[in-house]
Image (cartoon, helix red, strand yellow):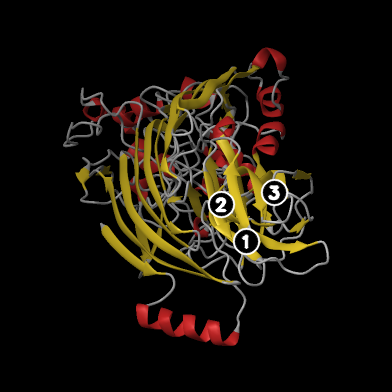
Amino acid sequence: MERMTVRFWSGRLVLITVACLAFLILGTVPSYGQIDTGSILGTVSDSSGARVSGATVTLTNEGTNAALSMVTGDDGSYKFTPVKIGTYKLTVTMQGFQTTTQHGVTVDVGANVVSDFSLKPGAVTETVEVTTAAPVLQSQDASVGQVVDSKSVNDLPLNGRNFTFLAQLAAGVNTPQADTRGNAATGAFAANGNRPAQNNYLLDGIDNNSDTVDFLNGTNFVVLPPVDAIQEFKVQTSDFSAEFGRSGAAVLNATIKSGTNSFHGSGWEFFRNDKLDAADFFENAGGVPKGALRQNQFGTTIGGPVIKNKIFFFADYEGLRRVQGTILTRTVPTDAERASGYTNFQDLIVGGSRPDALGRMVPVGTVLDPATTRQISPGVFVRDPFGTCQNEPANFVYTVAGCGLNLIPASRLDPNAIALLNLYPSPTSGSITSNFANSPKLFEHRNSFDARMDVNFSDKNQLFFRFSLVDDPQFIPGIFGGVADGGGFQQGNQTANAQQSALGYTHTFSPTLINVVRAGLNYLHTTRVSPSANDLSDIPSQFGIQDIPQLKENGGLPAFGIGGLQTLGSNAFLPSDEVSSTFQLTADVTKIFGKHTFKMGFEWQHVKFLAQQATRPELARQPSIPAEPMPSIFLVAPPTSARRTSHKPTTVRTIGADTSTTTGRSPTS
């Protein structure tokens, strides 16, 4: 599917013209909106407080020495916008006054830094160094948000070194409700009660949102740079500029570091190991040895000049190697059932009775014989239990000892059904429910890198380009492993390849007229298949299930939903393959008229996404009687051959509603 979006975030040209005239006439509040930049503004006055017109203000990037100058207006005011985030030096010169310089002026994402100057009489050759702190309150902007700088990103503890978790430090932001895709575990957040999918992720001013249908890779973003590569980011939760668009919740606006005239680098290694951890509560409860944990997260960054004052580079790499056991507890056939060859299910009768359609009292957990099905009135059917008491009259009371309940003749059992049940592992406890615990190992082998280059052609022309890639293959195991698998939709062999390219060009026509153009491309390809997806040895036919196409990624055992037991085989919704790409082009123009700043532009996006789920088999056998117990259908009645379904998820219907009361087991998931 393709979607094309064009957004003029300042309206049509005519509306812009009318609005500009109205603003000029009415003297409205200036506009202060920057995507991955900020602004510096202030006034220049003399020692008496009178405004100084015509003073020259020079803004110099302390990392790259890039400089831009302008003169103050009639009211002594000046403004630089947009200004790339970083640390700057401001210098003010005026004939008859001493030169005044202020160092360490820090510009954050979306910040409007106010820096006022008071000039003292003297020679221009005399220099006054000014040291002042930026005001804590941003009075120039009504948006609500919080900036998290590089120091905070690096110093605050982060499980998994995912900087998006720090968004939850902002006011009105909290952890979202857990979902089936695991987004909450990858840094998703809810702002002001909105859904995580309504947030807008930006990286270097480029769209970084996952546009896949159901977030198969478990993230709301496309690429995730390591924390050491993040210069800073800002979370805005309300009243942000119209240029951000899209978001109904919050905007997470991050910027990757740039190179400077000095070489800088870093390296890291973080590790976790089960030798340093205690056993999980559920591991102890299930009698399972402590699960494995081998996690190594390592990487490096480097940045510096290619040509001083002209060309700069920054690059980073991070790798993650993880082996992690996760305790899982599910239900499998009991030892007594297996030892009897699935002829003895008396352990399912645990107490209590209920009446059937004839008023006969049948113990809960009793298995009924489908061969005894008969109609006693229009639309009403009845069956007798397996055992010695057959065709008993109304109000009869069945007992285990008196009727030999739940003893099924071996001749009535289907050998294919027995073979399938034998795929289940032996229980690890004596209970009839939640009687199997295991800690299978997850494997993850992630590699990611970012490379950025900044070019200062001149004081009026700057360009940057960045490319980011994340390759994150994982094996997420089911509880059983092998052909039996038992995994859900979130489990299997998964690949996730994410890429992003960003290009930005800034041209300064004059200190009061600046044009910024950006282009970006996101690409995300995620797949998940069952562990035996490419085993094309026709495993289903070994269990009497015919006509399942043995195609790429369609191998293995289809899912069997057996009431009261964990699903057998691979999940019905696999394989799944999702691809999305977003091409973005933005352009904006900033014009300063005295105290007023006008900004207008447009954004064009071409979004393509494709979600595929291959045809999978469906075992279709309906019970003859409502609430028919599962064992009597699955073991006694021979299964029909599978039939293909087109563009549907694979489903194996759980035969027998209310199996939790009929068999005495509680369904597990």
Q: Secondary structure at mark 1?
A: strand
Vertical position of residue 479 compared to residue 563: above or below: above
Marker disc for residue 237: 1
Q: Quadrant of the N terminus?
A: bottom left
Residue positioned 58% across, 54% down in the render: 38
Q: Is residue 213 above or below residue 575?
A: below
**Is residue 58 or residue 121 the one in the foreground?**
121
Q: Position of residue 431 (x, y in %)?
A: 62, 30
Amino acid beneath label 2: Leu
User: How many numbered circles are shown?
Assistant: 3
Residue at which label 2 appears: 252
> What residue sits right under mark 3 in the picture?
124
- Badge 2 marks a residue whose secondary structure is strand
At label 3, which amino acid type do we have?
Answer: Val
Q: Is residue 631 visible?
A: yes
Dot 1 or dot 2, earlier in sequence: 1
The answer to whether 504 appears left or right of 103 in the picture is left
User: What crowding class fits label 2: few (fewer than 14 Cα within 10 Å), some (14-19), or many (20 or more)?
Assistant: many
